[in-house]
Every structure is written in structure tokens, then in C-alpha cells.
Image: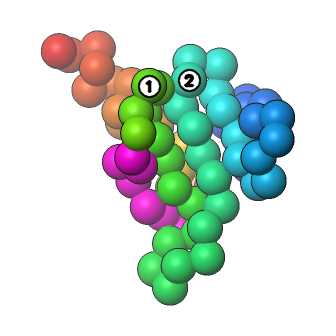
């Protein structure tokens, strides 16, 4: 996950990563999701996905949507 999204580990959190612009990704073990994504400053995930590739797509789509606003 770290190489595709350019993320860094979040200190003190297991399997939790943060992008340069503040998106937080963390592993989860749900039946229909393996990666959750939170927006910068968010308290809850906005996307529950099956792979890091899907997480990267969700983040890119969210960045694009912010640019339109």
C-alpha cells in the first residue's frame, strides 16, 4: 500500500497509514472490506474497499471532487 499511495506509517497505530495531504488508510478485517479510508480531519471512513488499488482510486476521485467545489 505504501508504495502506490506515497504514505507513511502512523506512529502508535498498527497497519495505519497517512498520505501527505492527510488521508488516513487502515486495514480492517470485514467480510466485504479490507481497507478503510478517512478524509483529512475526518472522524469516520468515507470508503470501505477491498484493496489498496481501490483505495488509491477513491482518494484520487475525492481529490478531484474537492477541486471542483
Q: Could one spot residue 58 in this view of the protein?
A: no
Decide if residue 54 is on the left or right side of residue 52: left
Q: Residue furthest front?
A: 12
Marks 2/1 in contact by CB < 8 Å: the verdict is: yes
Tell me residue 33's x, y (percent). Answer: 50, 72
- In-front residue for pair 18/53: 18
Q: Mark 1 points at which residue?
A: 41
* Residue 45 colored in magenta in the image: yes
Q: Is residue 56 above or below residue 60?
A: below
Q: Which numbered dot is residue 22?
A: 2
**Residue at left offset 41%, top offset 49%:** 45
Image color mode: rainbow
Give the secondary structure at mark 1.
loop
Separation of marks 2 and 1 at Cα, in angstroms: 7 Å
Q: Residues within 10 Å of mark 1 (few under 14, many from 20)?
A: few
Give the secondary structure at mark 2.
loop
Magenta stretch: give its range. 44-52
**Residue at left offset 50%, top offset 85%:** 31
* Residue 35 colored in magenta in the image: no
Q: What is the quadrant of residue 15 in the picture?
A: bottom right
Q: Quadrant of the C terminus?
A: top left
- In-front residue for pair 68/27: 27
Q: Could one spot residue 13 in this view of the protein?
A: yes
Decide if residue 15 is on the left or right side of residue 32: right
Q: Is residue 69 above or below residue 14?
A: above
**First in residue order: circle 2 vs circle 1:** 2
Q: What is the quadrant of residue 42 in the picture?
A: top left
**Residue at left offset 46%, top offset 41%:** 38
Tell me residue 43's x, y (percent). Answer: 41, 39
Tell me residue 51's x, y (percent). Answer: 59, 63
Tell me residue 28's x, y (percent). Answer: 60, 67
Amino acid at each position: 500500500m505504501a508504495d502506490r499511495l506515497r504514505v507513511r506509517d502512523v506512529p502508535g497505530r498498527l497497519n495505519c497509514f497517512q498520505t501527505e495531504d492527510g488521508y488516513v488508510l487502515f486495514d480492517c478485517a470485514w467480510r466485504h472490506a479490507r481497507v478503510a479510508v478517512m478524509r483529512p480531519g475526518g472522524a469516520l471512513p468515507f470508503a470501505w474497499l477491498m484493496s489498496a488499488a481501490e483505495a488509491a482510486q477513491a482518494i484520487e476521485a475525492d481529490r478531484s471532487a474537492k477541486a471542483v467545489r
